[in-house]
Image (cartoon, rainbow, N blue to C red):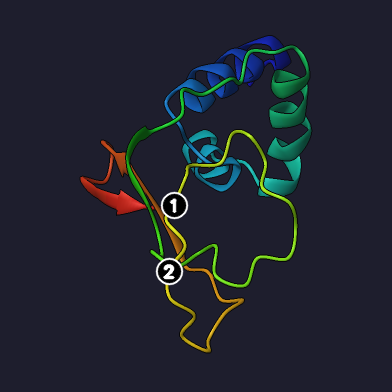
């Protein structure tokens, strides 16, 4: 396969969201041989993939309990919860919808 043809196929496959390993399988090449092509496509700016749509972001309700730094102006205002004796643990879940797989990922 000619180098220009391989580069164009890599561009197309990256725009489809394929991983370097998947690209290697499609092109019948080894991942080691495909990696420089993927990096070259990324360097030319042609590998920008649209981020999956954000499905939601959830943060534990008492995230600010025991916070020892001054609040940043952009942080959401939360009422000060009653001190429960537990602090310092925050749980954050971010969900993205991946239309290629039809379930939440990341």
Q: Is residue 39 left or right of residue 72?
A: right
Residue closest to the eye, 69 or 80: 80
Residue 82 lies, with reference to residue 33, above or below; the image says: below
Residue 98: % across, % down:
31, 40
Q: Quadrant of residue 2?
A: top right
Q: Quadrant of residue 53?
A: top left
Residue 10: % across, % down:
58, 23
Identify the residue position indicated by label 2 in the image: 81
Q: Residue at x 44, y 67 (%)?
A: 62
Q: Residue at x 63, y 34 (%)?
A: 73
Please tell me how many numbered marks the rendered image carries.
Answer: 2
Q: Is residue 53 left or right of residue 77?
A: left
Residue closest to the eye, 48 or 32: 48
Q: Is residue 20 left or right of residue 76?
A: right
Residue 58 lies, with reference to residue 52, above or below; the image says: below
Identify the residue position indicated by label 1 in the image: 78
Residue 80: % across, % down:
47, 62
Residue 32: % across, % down:
75, 47
Residue closest to the eye, 16 or 50: 50
Q: Look at the numbered discs 1 and 2 and tell me whether their residues touch, using CB distance below 8 Å.
A: yes
């Amino acid at each position: 396969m000619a180098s220009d043809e391989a580069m164009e196929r890599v561009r197309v496959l990256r725009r489809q969201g394929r991983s370097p390993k998947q690209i290697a399988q499609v092109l019948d090449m080894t991942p080691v041989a495909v990696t420089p092509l993927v990096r070259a496509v990324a360097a030319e700016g042609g590998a920008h993939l649209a981020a999956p749509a954000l499905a939601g972001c959830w943060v534990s309700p008492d995230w600010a309990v025991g916070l020892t730094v001054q609040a940043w102006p952009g942080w959401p205002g939360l009422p000060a919860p009653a001190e429960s004796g537990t602090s310092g643990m925050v749980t954050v879940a971010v969900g993205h919808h991946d239309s290629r797989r039809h379930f939440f990922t990341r």
